[in-house]
């Protein structure tokens, strides 16, 4: 089943990389929305059906933690899994976002396989597809 | 304390450049670097880490040729298909990853606040960079990376 994805990051490059990782993992995606910060993400969520959010934490205007809080407090949105993709791996921060309801946490620099495995777990799919399932160096 | 931070910074920079950008660097002395930089253009990116008692300013100077190769490798495209905005975005993301990796190593309990990377010069000639022992210099096949770490 195709799923709609929202990627939230102030870096266009990271949004591009994540889209590519998902594409070569063989996931069947519907619409892939992009937002450069939490505020822009809220606007996307207001007008579109999203099945999964991948969000950075440190962003101008509205950070990823505030976005996570808003999503989880909203009855219409709280069912959407949110995965944090960020540079910080400090235990305190990881615990905080998991307590706030994040479904997963990926630290940059990441290996594409990490994103693939996490999405498989969250979306409940055994294997993403037949296109390509194992990553090698340079597979971005 | 600053020396330990600089040592950790060297490890993190190597790790990030190798794992996400497929760039391998070697530390070189400031003197060796200074002899080789005439006319080289650099992009400068700054990030500030703020702790409860002190602040750390990190300035990264990327040789233009290195910056383009990093962007191409990161995005998986040819250098000729890269534009300047993409290069600057990739540089900011690299600095963000390095700073995040550094606080993970130096401040596991989480009192340091990570700033947002800022492009301070889109292209500056090497003559405008003060090259001394406070600057960590790295060479790669694609050009130099210079990093200044200032605590206050």
Image (cartoon, coloured by chain):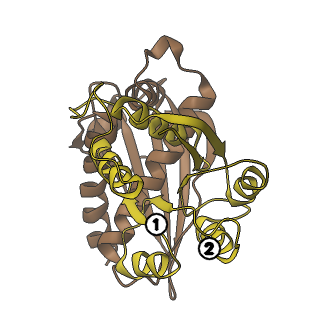
Chain colours: A yellow, B brown
Q: Residue furthest front?
A: A1
User: For the residue carrying disc 1, how many other residues have a C-alpha within 10 Å: few (<14), some (14-19), or many (20+)?
Assistant: some
User: For the residue carrying disc 2, how many other residues have a C-alpha within 10 Å: few (<14), some (14-19), or many (20+)?
Assistant: some
Give how far across and how far down residue A73 sits, in percent.
Answer: 67, 77
* B144 on left or right of B115: left
What subunit carries mark 2?
Answer: A
Number of numbered labels in the structure image: 2
Q: Secondary structure at mark 2?
A: helix
Q: Which of the image's four quarters has the C terminus of chain A?
A: top left
Determine the residue positioned at 25% across, 63% down.
Answer: B7
Residue position for label 2: A72
* Residue B117 against residue B44 in the figure, above or below: below
**Is residue B43 shown to the viewer in this render?**
no
* B96 on left or right of A50: left
Q: CA distance from mark 2 to mark 1?
A: 40 Å
* Snapshot quadrant of residue A139: top left
Determine the residue positioned at 29% across, 71% down.
Answer: B105
* Residue B93 against residue B34 in the figure, above or below: below
**Is residue A9 shown to the viewer in this render?**
yes
* Snapshot quadrant of residue B122: top right
Which dot, 2 or 1, sits closer to the camera? Answer: 2
* B23 on left or right of A77: left
Q: Residue furthest top?
A: B80
Determine the residue positioned at 47% across, 60% down.
Answer: A83
Q: Secondary structure at mark 1?
A: strand
What subunit carries mark 1?
Answer: B
Res B150 label:
1
| Near-viewer residue (A130 or A82) | A130
């Amino acid at each position: 089943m195709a799923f709609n994805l929202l990627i939230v990051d102030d870096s266009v490059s990271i949004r591009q990389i994540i889209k590519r990782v998902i594409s070569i993992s063989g996931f069947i995606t519907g619409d892939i929305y992009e937002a450069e910060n939490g505020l822009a993400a809220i606007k996307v969520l207001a007008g579109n059906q999203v099945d999964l959010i991948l969000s950075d934490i440190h962003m101008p205007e509205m950070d990823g933690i505030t976005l996570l809080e808003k999503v989880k407090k909203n009855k219409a949105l709280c069912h959407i899994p949110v995965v944090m993709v960020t540079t910080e791996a400090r235990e305190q921060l990881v615990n905080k976002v998991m307590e706030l309801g994040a479904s997963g946490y990926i630290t940059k620099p990441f290996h594409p396989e990490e994103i693939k495995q996490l999405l498989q777990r969250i979306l409940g799919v055994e294997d993403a597809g037949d296109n390509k399932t194992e990553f090698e160096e340079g597979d971005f | 304390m600053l020396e330990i931070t600089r040592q950790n910074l060297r490890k993190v920079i190597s790790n990030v450049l190798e794992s996400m950008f497929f760039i391998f660097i070697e530390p070189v002395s400031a003197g060796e670097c200074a002899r080789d930089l005439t006319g080289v253009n650099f992009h400068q990116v700054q990030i500030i880490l703020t702790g409860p008692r002190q602040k750390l300013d990190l300035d990264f100077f990327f040789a233009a040729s290195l910056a383009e190769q990093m962007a191409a490798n990161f995005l998986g495209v040819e250098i000729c298909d890269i534009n300047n905005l993409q290069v600057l975005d990739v540089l900011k993301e690299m600095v963000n990853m390095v700073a995040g990796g550094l606080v993970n190593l130096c401040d596991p309990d989480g009192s340091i606040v990570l700033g947002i990377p800022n492009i301070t010069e889109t292209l500056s000639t090497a003559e405008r960079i003060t090259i001394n022992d406070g600057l960590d210099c790295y060479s790669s096949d694609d050009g130099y990376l210079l990093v200044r770490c200032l605590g206050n």
